Image (tube, rainbow, N blue to C red):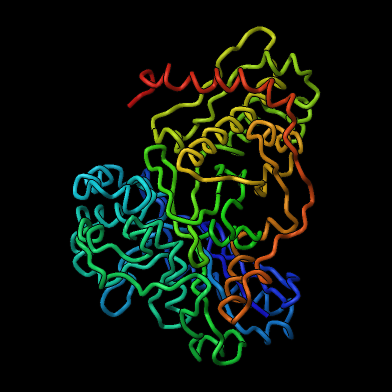
Amino acid sequence: MYLGIDLGTSEVKVLLLGADHRVLAVAGSPLTVSRPQPHWSEQDPADWWAATGAAVAAVRAKAPKEFAAVRAIGLSGQMHGATLLDAADRVLRPAILWNDTRSSAECAELTQRFPALPQVAGNLAMPGFTAPKLLWVAKHEPAVFAKVASVLLPKDWLRLCMTGEKVGEMSDAAGTLWLDVERRAWSPELLAATGLTVGHMPRLVEGSAVSGTLLPAVAQAWGLPAGVVVAGGGGDNAASAVGIGAVQPGAGFLSLGTSGVMFVVTDKFRPNPASAVHAFCHAVPGRWHQMSVTLSAASSLAWVTKLLRADGEAALLAQSEALTDAERDAAPIFLPYLSGERTPHNDASAQGMFFGLNHDTDAARLAWAVIEGVAFSMCDGLAALQAAGTKVGALSLVGGGSRSALWGQLLASALNLELHVPDGGAAGGALGAARLAWLADGGVEAEVCGTPATLTKFVPQAAQHARLAPRYARYRALYPATKALNPH
């Protein structure tokens, strides 16, 4: 039996996986985010530990016999968060989270200090990453910075509580801007740019390797035997990929959640920072991955549904499904930049837009424009990945948007890729964490990281792809034509 613990932003999810691949129990414990000032997003690490204990207890109550037979635990979690510890391992301040944007000015400063950062770290300096957060702390909270002895990512702070060991792993560390992503090792030069050294960082292991064993007191409190192994684990997206079997080059997923993510496994480090592509280590040895990001994906549909006061997203999509091809061709073009945009523009000031409104524009056409605009944004992301030399095969389709057959087919035709909706895709990082625990316990990757059964398959339709082409060309022309009009 294997336990996966996923420390998300809104909850800690714990999953119990059997050696026959069956998910035996799942439980979650909620978390809240503190926003004491505009652009700030923080959490108290003590809340992570309390929520983890509650979720573990709930899983134990659901399957007590199986839980007692757990052999290894894997960790997954929200990336980029800065958990600052003093020399006695005490938390110095609330953790600064991935969606905290206070460090915009520090991003430019960091790149000035080390111009080669995008090539070494595989990413542009953005406020979401960990390194700019430390520059902000040094500048605005110097007394706190002076006491910093260790910096841990959120899931790795949980590991410290569980094992007493300060250990990180490659996929999460790649999201700090302190890792030499190609070498899979901390970069002294990147660390020096933020006033830190390798001594401030945890020891690194691969996600499928042993990072330590459960402390006796924790094992007793959780009702587990002594010596339970804790695996390196993975950042949330990398762990989710392991959970759906995306571990070989070319495999990956497209996630239609609040944001949209295209994740593709690569056989080597393939950076393309100029197009705001993220290049990270994967959670399994010898592999990397690329990600393109659309900041407003399913959230764009939620926004237009609320704007139109429609009777739910499904009802609005049903109206769009009834449109003829000619009516869809006459719909407005939508830029889904409601929160700025990441790939390929990396423009926080980019704004959303409907272009081509007329007296025939109705709710159905607006909804079609929105889901089409998100699909076109994902096409931009695919092009950015391919420009870095990445070959993309069929992708899994996960996230809330995967429930819409209309949107799934639209995406498949726009991208000209097969999309498979996997069984159990909602389990996310917790399932991948449990699989990484299994690997750390001696499991064989080919047997542990299989691909789940496909619930639905979307195959590109040549006719639809051809009809979308001229609309995609208009979509691509809009941003450069209007960029100067956006507020800066």
Determine the image quadrant of residue 357.
Answer: top right
Residue 258 at x, y = what percent? 57, 43
Query: On the rendered structure, is 327 left or right of 182?
Result: right
Up/down of 313 relative to 23, above or below:
above
What residue sits 49% from the left and 49% below the top? 290
Residue 20 at x, y = what percent? 76, 75
Determine the image quadrant of residue 419.
Answer: top right
Residue 423 at x, y = what percent? 75, 56
Up/down of 5 relative to 472, above or below:
below
What residue sits 36% from the left and 57% below the top? 176
User: Is residue 469 among what the camera can see?
Assistant: yes
User: Is residue 34 among what the camera can see?
Assistant: no
What residue sits 42% from the left and 71% below the top? 157
Give the quadrant of the C terminus: top left
Up/down of 264 relative to 62, above or below:
above
Give the quadrant of the N terminus: bottom right
Up/down of 63 relative to 398, above or below:
below
Q: Nearer the viewer, residue 234 or 218?
A: 234
